[in-house]
Every structure is written in C-alpha cells, then in structure tokens.
Amino acid sequence: MLIGISPLLSPELLSTLYRMGHGDEMVLADAHFPGESVNNTIVRADGLRIPGLLDAILPLFALDAHVDTPVFMMDAAPGDTLDPAVEASYRVMIDKHWPETPTIARVERFSFYDQARQAFVVVMTGETAKYGNIILKKGVTPVG
C-alpha cells in the first residue's frame, strides 16, 4: 500500500500509467470487450468496476486539454440502446477530478475497436455494464 494511491491500482497498472506519454490512450474495457484480439498490451483489473478505476486513475492522470475530445465511449449498435446511467456514472468521476473536460464523444463500435488497436494499453476490467468501454487520452502532467 502507498499513501495517497488507491489500492485499486495494481503495480502493473501504476507502472503503465507512469510510462504513458501525452497523447497516449488507455482503454478501460468492460468484461465483454475483445481486449486480447485488438491490442497486445493488456493489464488485468478483473472484478473492478470502471467508475472506481476512474476515481483511482484520474488523480494521477491528466486528460488531454489540447484536443477537442479526450474521452470516448462506444456507441450503441443500430437497433440497440444505451443505458444513460453508465455514462453518467463515469462523468461523475471525470467531473470530480477534471471538471473542464468536454462532453464524452461516442464512437461507432468498429471504429472504437480500431482506436483500441492503437491505444497504449487495454485495461480489462470486471465492468458488466453494456457499452461500458471508455478511452482516456492522456495529457501533459502538471508540474509544481
């Protein structure tokens, strides 16, 4: 355990956060996401829900303030529906740490997979919410 560091952050995840540079993206993937199929860099966070991970990660991780959209979620497939409570629960954590963050962008499913292929890491969580995947774009870490 470390003072001021959430126990939800494993040593591997903490190391990954440290190694990321500005502009790098991290996927927090729900338990249904094909992480191993889309990216070679996987960190396991089994059993952990995404809102808790956001609350643990965002005090340590600046979102990119130099892009229009630093946060992305998968859009519903045609004929399917989104549960607005999922995005709302994520937004609570984003606003807690980075309240100036623009609206979360929605990305078509296969475009989301393409974006995940280019991500620095996919974190496989225990999130069970449908369309619960989220991508965070890292910004420049404030100094001082």
Image (spheres, grey):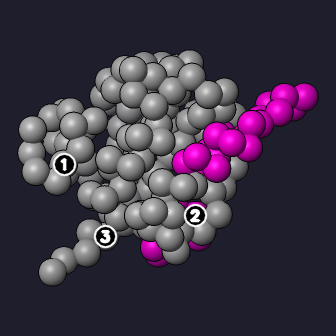
Which of 135 and 100 lies nearest the eye of the viewer? 100
Label 3 residue SS: loop
Label 2 residue SS: loop
Query: In the rendering, which numbered label is found on residue 136?
Result: none
Relative side of 112 to 142, left or right: right
- Residue 139 in the magenta stretch? The answer is no
Seen as rendered, the residue at the extreme right is 79
Q: Distance between the residues labelled 1 and 2?
A: 27 Å
Earlier residue among tags 1 and 3: 1
Query: In the rendering, which numbered label is found on residue 140?
Result: 3
Query: Which corner quadrant of the image does residue 32 belong to?
Result: top right
* Residue on which disc 1 sits: 5
**Three-letter code, disc 2:** Thr
> Total label count?
3
Q: How far apart are marks 2 and 3 (CA)?
A: 15 Å
Which of 26 and 4 lies nearest the eye of the viewer? 4
